[in-house]
């Protein structure tokens, strides 16, 4: 009788232990699944590059304004005036159309190693994709005017560049870009015997704030 009681006790203890293990494993799996769901929800709500998980009121159709500070590093021939470096700020105002294309105009002030220019330019941009962080291609081009010596120190320029914008608030983005800034002496178009250095090139680095609807 004593042996039977001991055997029954062992069986009951084993069954209780097995049942507890099953419950523990089920709870662990349930907690693990809930943790993964919460983890995925967190990244869905914070992921910068998401396009489908949440609505995004980013750059759409409407007015935009871009203000940038920039520094240009002279390339190759830097001894002539207005060729070593420049630093300054520009502001552009324009309209973003559907499909990511934007067109505007801008002005600013650029300080060179030997003087200054006032840029007056068309601002052309194309923003790619629908994600929160957008890459873009830009091509500002126009005139660089110097009113101390308009004839000799004024230029025309083009600045193809690539960059990205990062949202920091509603309708507000940080803009980063770099490219090739080339300014051309306008005398080359008027004087066919012109034999001086006819252009200067720079690598401009730009940081700005983009406001858009």
Image (cartoon, helix red, strand yellow):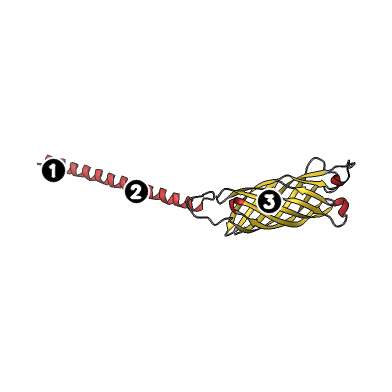
Q: Which residue is mark 1?
A: 5
Characterize the local packing of mark 2: few (<14), some (14-19) or many (20 or more) Cα atoms within 10 angstroms: few
Instruction: Please name whichever residue, 145 or 8, is drawn nearer the observer in this view of the structure.
Output: 145
- Tag nearer the camera, 1 or 3: 3
Left or right of 140? Residue 184 is right
Q: Which residue is mark 3?
A: 124
Q: Which of the marked residues, 2 or 1, is nearer the chain's N terminus?
A: 1
Q: Is residue 80 visible?
A: no
Q: Which of the marked residues, 1 or 3, is nearer the chain's N terminus?
A: 1
Task: Measuring from the top left, give residue 29's x and y in whole percent.
Answer: 34, 46
Characterize the local packing of mark 1: few (<14), some (14-19) or many (20 or more) Cα atoms within 10 angstroms: few
Helix, strand or loop status at disc 1: helix
Instruction: Please name whichever residue, 87 or 135, is drawn nearer the observer in this view of the structure.
Output: 135
Instruction: Please name whichever residue, 35 or 166, is drawn nearer the observer in this view of the structure.
Output: 166
Left or right of 116? Residue 99 is left
- Tag nearer the camera, 2 or 3: 3
Q: Which residue is mark 2?
A: 30
The residue at 13%/43% (across/down) is 5
Q: CA distance from mark 2 to mark 3?
A: 54 Å
Task: Measuring from the top left, give residue 122's x and y in whole percent.
Answer: 72, 53
């Amino acid at each position: 009788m004593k042996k039977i009681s001991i055997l029954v006790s062992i069986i009951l203890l084993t069954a209780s232990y097995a049942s507890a293990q099953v419950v523990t494993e089920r709870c662990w799996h349930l907690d693990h699944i809930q943790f993964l769901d919460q983890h995925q929800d967190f990244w869905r709500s914070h992921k910068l590059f998401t396009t489908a998980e949440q609505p995004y009121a980013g750059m759409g159709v409407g007015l935009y304004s871009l203000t940038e500070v920039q520094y240009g590093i002279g390339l190759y021939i830097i001894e002539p005036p207005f060729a070593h470096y420049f630093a300054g700020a520009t502001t552009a105002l324009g309209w973003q159309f559907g499909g990511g294309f934007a067109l505007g105009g801008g002005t600013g002030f650029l300080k060179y190693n030997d003087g200054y220019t006032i840029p007056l330019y068309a601002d052309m941009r194309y923003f790619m994709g629908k994600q929160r962080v957008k890459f873009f291609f830009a091509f500002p081009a126009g005139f660089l005017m110097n009113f101390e010596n308009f004839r000799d120190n004024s230029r025309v320029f083009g600045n193809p560049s690539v960059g990205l914008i990062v949202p920091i608030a509603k309708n507000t983005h940080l803009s980063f870009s770099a490219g090739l800034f080339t300014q051309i002496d306008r005398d080359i178009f008027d004087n066919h015997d012109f034999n001086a250095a006819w252009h200067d090139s720079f690598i401009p680095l730009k940081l700005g704030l983009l406001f858009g609807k």
